[in-house]
Amino acid sequence: MTRTLGGHHQRLAHAGTAAADSADAGARARDWAEIQERMLVPLYEAVYERLEVRGGTRVLGLGCGSGLALLLAAARGARVTGVDSDRARLALARERLRADPARSGGAGLAADTGTLLQVDRMADAAPGPGRSPYDLITAFEPIGCVAGDAKGLGPALDEAIPLAGRGTPVVLAGWGPPERCATDGVLRVAGRLSDRPREGARRPGHRDDLEEVAARAGLEPDGSGRVACPFGYADQESAVRGLLSTGVFDGAIRTTNRRLVEKEIGEALHPHLRRDGTVWMPNVFRYLIARTP
């Protein structure tokens, strides 16, 4: 009997932990969607304008998050497909597309208008009978924040590229040089508190980072650009929540604890606090347009 009760309590404890983890993931996804994701809107819009995304354009978004970039493309008439590994973010993206059917061609999550997939279901994004290949592939999640943050991009590109036609543009994004990114000092908190500071610290972005990723994927560079994407927050609390939602500080939290990380981020934000209590950090991001072989 004791053994049975013990097993029962262990299962309850496990279920409680799983529920807490799920709630935390959901809260962080909402912080990303409501606070942080919008910071990259100038990047999304600059790319869509340059590549003339419009009605009929088929867009495949890698690392689509909670779907804001997809909504902006759909607002231009594009048919969008998004892939991400974060279930909580994908759930929010589905809600967004369903809540605004006008932006997705009036068809919500119709297969040819707004499809959202787990990253391990990339094969389901393949064009089926009667559907043309993708006209644009985007990987808007910026690399160059921490060493090695482009590792997962290679396999995703390897799977996505065959789904597009020859000469299709593929857009990669990255952080600009530290001297052009006010957020750099805050990001360094992640490395300082991490158990692997050499790997986790913010490193200077190299101009050829995006070109190297493109070369490894067999893509041919065909232009680039820089976009100002300032990070602006209503107050210091929302800034901390937004930054934590990026995942950059996860290693530091595992090594220390969330409260300490929040404290350190808050202190790093002091130089960027304005008199009205808002937080403002100018940043520059770079994007590369490369073509499929």
Image: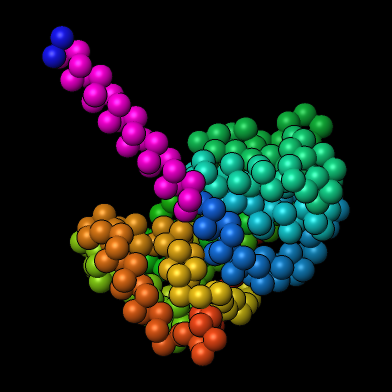
Q: Position of residue 229 (x, y in %)?
A: 59, 76
Find the residue positioned furthest to the left: 2
Q: Is residue 25 magenta?
A: yes
Q: Residue at x 51, y 41 (%)?
A: 87
| Magenta stretch: dominant secondary structure | helix
The answer to whether residue 261 is left or right of residue 134 is: left
Q: Position of residue 96 (x, y in %)?
A: 69, 48
Q: Position of residue 268 (x, y in %)?
A: 36, 79
- Tell me where the magenta segment starts and ends, as one range: 3-28
Q: Residue furthest top?
A: 1
Q: In the image, residue 99 lies at what x, y percent?
A: 74, 46
Decide which of 17, 51 is in the foreground and name it.
17
Q: Quadrant of the N terminus?
A: top left
Residue 243 falls in image quadrant = bottom left
Camera sees residue 263: yes
The question of residue 89 being in magenta is answered with no
Colouring chosen for the image of the structure: rainbow
Residue 170, compared with residue 281, is above or below; it is above
Q: Outermost residue toward the bottom?
A: 275
Q: Quadrant of residue 128?
A: top right
77 displayed left or right of 10: right
Which residue is painted at 62% across and 32% down in the image?
A: 124
Q: In terms of depth relative to the viewer, which is nearer, 206 or 89? A: 89
Task: Name the residue: 35% across, 62% down.
Answer: 249
Q: How many circles with numbers are drawn on the protein? A: 0
Residue at point 53%, 81% (across, down): 278
Visible residue check, residue 222: no
Q: Is residue 125 left or right of residue 270?
A: right
